[in-house]
Image: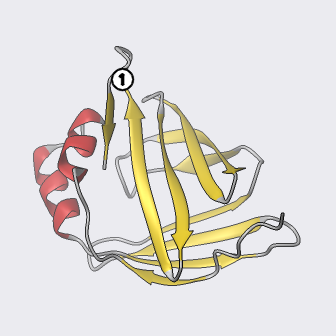
Amino acid sequence: MSKPDYSGVFHMVEQDNMDAYLAALDINFALRKIVCLLKPTKDISHNLATGAMTIRTLTTFKNFNMDFVIGQEFAEDLGPVDGRTCQTTVSWEGDKLVCVQRGEKEGRGWTHWLDGNKLHLDFFFRCGSGEEAGG
């Protein structure tokens, strides 16, 4: 079964539980409030042949670029997001892209999937207690 092509430009329509997710990551109150007001655009370039992908997250506050090859670990600078760095791997789980970020805050990441022309994004953070916060 071939994997979907994630290339395209996607505009955020809504978000749920983002403040709780950011609080679980110890993001300060002011930055959490700003992030929750943003309506980012995702500009994704995906090369199906090589697995190379660029995800540009564009906002009026800050922009964030993520360049990687699916299945290969890379060093990710989360400075624009929360000032941290981590080792990141994005891999396929069926038709979904699942990102796992290892670093100062273990057990964090996200899942992307397509539903027609809509791109869905689910953040996750698994605390040491087994509880999960999502946004």
Looking at the image, the residue that sits furthest to the top is 129
In the image, what residue occupies the spot 22% across and 50% down?
17
Q: Secondary structure at mark 1?
A: loop
Q: How is the image coloured?
A: secondary structure
In the image, what residue occupies the spot 64% across and 74% down?
6
The amino acid type found where label 1 is placed reads Cys
Q: Quadrant of residue 14?
A: bottom left
Q: Which residue is mark 1?
A: 127
Q: Relative to residue 31, is residue 115 drawn left or right?
A: right
Q: Position of residue 40 (x, y in %)?
A: 34, 75
Residue situated in front as seen by the camera: 28 or 69: 69
Measured along the vertical axis of the image, is residue 100 above or below residue 33? above
Q: Position of residue 2 (x, y in %)?
A: 82, 67
Looking at the image, the residue that sits furthest to the right is 49
Q: Relative to residue 54, is residue 2 drawn left or right?
A: right
Q: Quadrant of residue 11?
A: bottom left
Count residues near mark 1 (Cα–Cα under 10 Å), then give few for <14, some for 14-19, many for 20+. some
Q: Position of residue 16 (x, y in %)?
A: 23, 57
In the image, what residue occupies the spot 58% across and 47% down?
99
In the image, what residue occupies the spot 39% across and 35% down?
125
* Image quadrant occupied by the N terminus: bottom right
Q: Position of residue 22 (x, y in %)?
A: 26, 44
